[in-house]
Image (cartoon, rainbow, N blue to C red):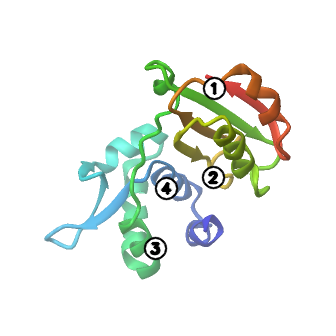
Amino acid sequence: MWDQISGKFIRNPSQQKVVKKMISIGLNVEMDMERKLRIYCDGIEIKPNSIAEAINVDRRVVVETLRKIAEDPGLLEFFQNLRPVCNLGVASSKVGMGVIEILPDSANQSGIIAGVADIIARERISIRQVIGDDPDLVEDPKAIIVTDVPVPSNMLSKIKAVPGVKAVVIL
């Protein structure tokens, strides 16, 4: 996915930065009544200058990125369908839920989440949320697993033994 999208912005690293941020936080685009493309986060409009300031690029870079997206039917459809997702991660531990951070040997290895989920299920603990970083978008990808109850410490060694798990952190 990322190779296909970033290839459209290969000559402009600043525009790639804009696109990467939009994808990583789920900002979508919509055409307004004047056929101008606008950026939204779950229906809330995000102005180009806000994005520019957040990622340290000029506002015109964001506007030009939107122009390129609008001109490419495939990109336009992709960005029209992005959605933001709530990461319960750290906040859940503050209200008595369990939060496990899984650091992989390689984020491209299959079966890591399945192995960890199996261990959690065997303890009859329900999983509320699993969020994994995209290795193409995040330098050090990890997965966050939120459970109904705190994970017992005796499960740590079992989780660490799952093939592909480099480290486990209980938050």
In this view of the protein, which residue sits in the foreground, 166 or 140?
A: 166
C-alpha distance separating marks 4 and 3 = 12 Å
C-alpha distance separating marks 2 and 1 = 25 Å
Residue 33 image position (x, y, % from top left): 13, 70
> Which callout, 4 or 2, points to the residue nearer the camera?
2
C-alpha distance separating marks 1 and 3 = 41 Å
On the image, numbered disc 2 is attached to which residue?
134
Amino acid under disc 1? Val
Amino acid under disc 4? Ile
SS under mark 3: helix
Q: If you read the primary sequence from the N terminus, does the residue marked by circle 3 or circle 2 appear first?
A: 3
Residue 151 image position (x, y, % from top left): 63, 26
C-alpha distance separating marks 3 and 2 = 19 Å
Quick check: 93 above or below 66? above
Quadrant (top left, top right, bottom left, bottom right) of the N terminus: bottom right
Q: If you read the primary sequence from the N terminus, does the residue marked by circle 1 or circle 3 appear first?
A: 3
Amino acid under disc 3? Leu
> Which callout, 2 or 1, points to the residue nearer the camera?
1
On the image, numbered disc 1 is attached to which residue?
151
